C-alpha cells in the first residue's frame, strides 16, 4: 500500500469524510522507500577503558528498588530504563596481560593470542558480529564501529602485547578485527550517501572499479597494518555495493532510510575536544538506528591504556590511565571516580537521545538493548571479576529493565552476551563459555 497523504478523505456523492491519522500516513519509512514500518530491534555495545572505582559502583539493593551509587548518579532519571548486572566475569581474561586481554576479548569471551605484531588473533568472533552476520542482510551496513582514538602501533613494554589489540572490540573473524571510524563527519557523510542511494551500485562502473588503480598505487606506500585496514575498508565498500544492489533487485523488499538526511545538520569536522567528539559519535549511533542504516553498533570511548587527559572536568588533573592506577590514594580515587561518572553521563545522554525518537507506539530506546561496560573492574588491580555492566532499553519488549540483577559470583559474562543474541532473535544455544541465558533479564 502506498503512503497516504494526511489530507486523504473518503469521498462519495456530495460528501467527503476526513480520516483519522493512520500508520500509512507516516512519512518516515514508506516515504523513503522502505517496505514496512515494523520496529526493528537494535544492539549497541559501549566500551570505556580502565575500569571503575569499585566501592562506588554496585547498588546495595537488588531487584527493582535500588539506589544509584555515586558513579551511577547520572542515570538516576533514567533508572527505569537501565539494569545493573553484577557478578559477571570473563574467565578467559584472567591470564594477566594487563588491559589488552580483558579489553580485546570483552565481546568474544576468549583469550587473545599474545603477539608483538599485526598477526592478531582473538580466538573467537565477537557477539556483535554474530548478530551482524544474521541481521546484516536487512540493512545497508551490517554493523557500525566507532571510536575516539586512533590505533596505536608498537609493543606495550609492560605486558609484551602489541598495542593494536587495544583499539578493537569487534571481531568479524578471529584474525580480522574491524577498524573503527573516529571522525563523526565521515560517519555522517557515509550514512548520507547510503540514504541518498549514491552508493547503490546502480552505476555502470562500481566504485571499486573506479578507484582500483589509485588504490593499487596507495598500497605500495603503506605499512603492513595500514594495508590491512585499507583492504578491510575496500571490502566494506564492495560489500555495501553488493548489498544495496541485491536489495534493489529483490522485488519483495526494498530498503529505504527512515530519515531524510537533508533535514539533519552535519556534525563539525573531526573536533579535537574529547567531550565534543564523544557526543557527536553517540549522535551518530542514534541517527544510524533511527534511519535503520544498521542494527548493530560498537563504540569505544577510548582505547586500552587510554591516556586521554580529563583535565576538562572539574577537579581532575591527568590522564585516565594514570589516575586508574590510584594506589588507593584518596586524591586519585576521587578523580578516577569523576571520570567514570562522566562516562556514565554520556551513556545517560544516549539513553535520553534514543528515548526521544518516537517509533511505532514507543521509541527507539524501547526497541534497543544498549550494553555499557569495561573490560575489568578496578584499574589498579586489572581485576576481571565482577565486571561493571549496565544494560539500557527493553529490546523490543523482551527485557525487563530497571533492576539490579546480582548474579552468583563469577557468572560468565558470556551468559549476558548470549542473552543479547536471543533478544535480537539470534537463538544460539551457547556463546564462548556461556552456561545459559540470564533468565531474570527477560519478560
Image (cartoon, helix red, strand yellow):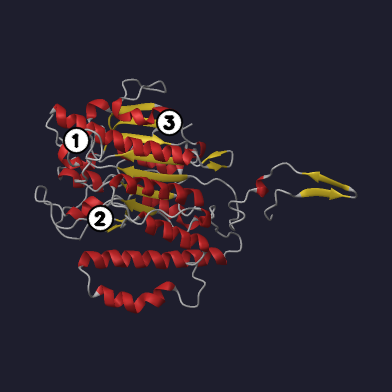
Report the residue marked by disc 1. 383
| Residue 61 pos. (x, y %) | 34, 20
Mark closest to the chain's N terminus, 2 or 1: 2
Q: Secondary structure at mark 1?
A: loop
- Residue drawn at 20 percent across, 60 percent down: 119
Which is more toward the observer, 204 or 350? 350
The answer to whether 73 appears left or right of 100 in the picture is right
Q: Is residue 191 positioned above or below 15 on the image?
A: below
Q: Position of residue 143 (x, y in %)?
A: 40, 54
- Which residue is found at the position 37% from the left and 49% from the top? 281
Left or right: 40 with respect to 154?
A: right
Quadrant in which the N terminus appears = bottom right
- Contact, CB < 8 Å: mark 3 with mark 1? no
Residue 269 is left or right of residue 227, and the answer is right
| Distance from the alpha carbon under mark 2 to that under mark 1 | 26 Å
Count how many numbered circles sit on residues in the image.
3
Foreground mark, 2 or 1, reads 2
In space, the residues marked 3 and 1 are separated at their CA atoms by 28 Å
Residue 428 visible to an observer of this rendering: no
Q: Which residue occupies the foreground of this view, 294 or 281?
A: 281
Q: Earlier in the sequence, mark 3 or mark 1?
A: 3
Q: Secondary structure at mark 3?
A: helix
Q: Are marks 2 and 1 in contact (CB under 8 Å)?
A: no
Label 3: few (<14), some (14–19) or many (≥20) C-alpha neighbours in 10 Å: some
- Above or below, comparing residue 102 to residue 85 in the picture: below
Give the residue pinned by disc 3: 78
Residue at image coords 34%, 64%: 233
Amino acid at each position: 500500500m502506498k503512503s497516504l497523504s494526511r489530507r486523504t478523505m473518503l469521498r462519495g456523492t456530495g460528501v467527503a469524510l476526513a480520516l483519522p491519522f493512520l500508520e500509512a500516513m507516516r512519512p518516515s519509512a514508506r516515504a523513503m522507500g522502505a517496505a514496512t514500518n515494523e520496529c526493528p530491534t537494535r544492539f549497541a555495545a559501549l566500551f570505556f577503558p580502565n575500569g571503575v572505582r569499585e566501592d562506588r559502583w554496585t547498588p546495595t539493593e537488588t531487584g527493582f528498588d535500588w539506589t544509584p551509587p555515586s558513579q551511577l548518579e547520572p542515570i538516576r532519571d533514567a533508572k527505569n530504563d537501565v539494569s545493573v548486572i553484577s557478578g559477571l566475569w570473563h574467565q578467559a581474561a584472567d591470564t594477566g596481560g594487563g588491559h589488552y586481554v580483558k579489553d580485546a576479548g570483552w565481546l568474544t569471551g576468549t583469550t587473545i593470542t599474545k603477539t608483538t605484531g599485526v598477526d592478531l588473533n582473538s580466538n573467537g568472533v565477537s557477539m556483535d558480529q554474530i548478530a551482524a552476520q544474521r541481521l546484516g542482510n536487512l540493512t545497508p551496513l551490517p554493523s557500525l564501529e566507532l571510536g575516539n582514538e586512533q590505533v596505536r602501533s608498537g609493543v606495550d613494554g609492560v605486558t609484551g602485547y602489541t598495542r593494536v589489540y587495544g583499539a578493537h572490540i569487534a571481531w568479524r573473524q578471529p584474525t580480522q578485527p574491524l577498524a573503527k571510524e573516529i571522525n563523526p563527519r565521515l560517519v555522517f557523510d557515509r550514512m548520507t550517501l547510503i540514504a541518498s542511494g549514491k552508493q547503490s551500485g546502480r552505476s555502470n562502473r562500481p566504485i571499486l572499479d573506479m578507484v582500483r588503480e589509485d588504490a593499487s598505487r596507495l598500497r605500495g606506500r603503506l605499512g603492513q597494518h595500514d594495508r590491512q585496514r585499507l583492504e578491510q575498508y575496500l571490502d566494506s565498500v564492495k560489500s555495501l555495493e553488493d548489498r544495496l544492489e541485491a536489495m534493489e533487485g529483490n522485488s519483495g523488499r526494498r530498503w529505504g532510510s527512515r530519515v531524510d538526511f537533508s533535514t539533519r545538520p552535519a556534525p563539525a569536522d573531526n573536533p579535537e575536544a574529547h567531550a565534543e567528539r564523544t557526543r557527536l559519535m553517540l549522535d551518530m549511533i542514534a541517527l544510524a538506528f533511527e534511519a535503520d542504516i544498521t542494527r548493530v553498533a560498537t563504540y569505544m570511548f577510548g582505547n586500552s591504556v587510554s591516556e586521554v587527559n580529563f583535565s576538562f572536568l572539574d577537579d581532575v588533573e591527568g590522564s585516565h590511565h594514570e589516575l586508574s592506577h590510584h594506589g588507593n590514594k584518596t586524591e586519585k580515587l576521587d578523580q578516577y571516580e569523576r571520570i567514570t561518572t562522566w562516562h556514565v553521563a554520556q551513556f545517560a545522554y544516549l539513553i535520553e537521545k534514543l528515548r526521544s525518537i518516537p517509533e511505532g507506539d514507543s521509541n527507539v530506546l524501547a526497541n534497543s538493548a544498549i550494553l555499557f561496560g569495561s573490560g575489568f573492574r578496578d584499574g589498579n588491580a586489572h581485576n576481571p571479576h565482577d565486571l561493571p555492566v549496565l544494560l539500557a532499553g527493553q529490546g523490543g519488549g523482551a527485557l525487563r529493565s530497571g533492576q539490579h540483577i546480582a548474579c552468583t559470583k563469577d557468572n560468565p559474562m558470556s551468559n549476558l552476551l548470549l542473552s543479547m543474541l536471543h533478544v535480537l532473535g539470534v537463538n544460539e544455544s551457547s556463546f564462548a563459555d556461556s552456561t545459559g541465558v540470564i533468565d531474570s533479564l527477560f519478560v
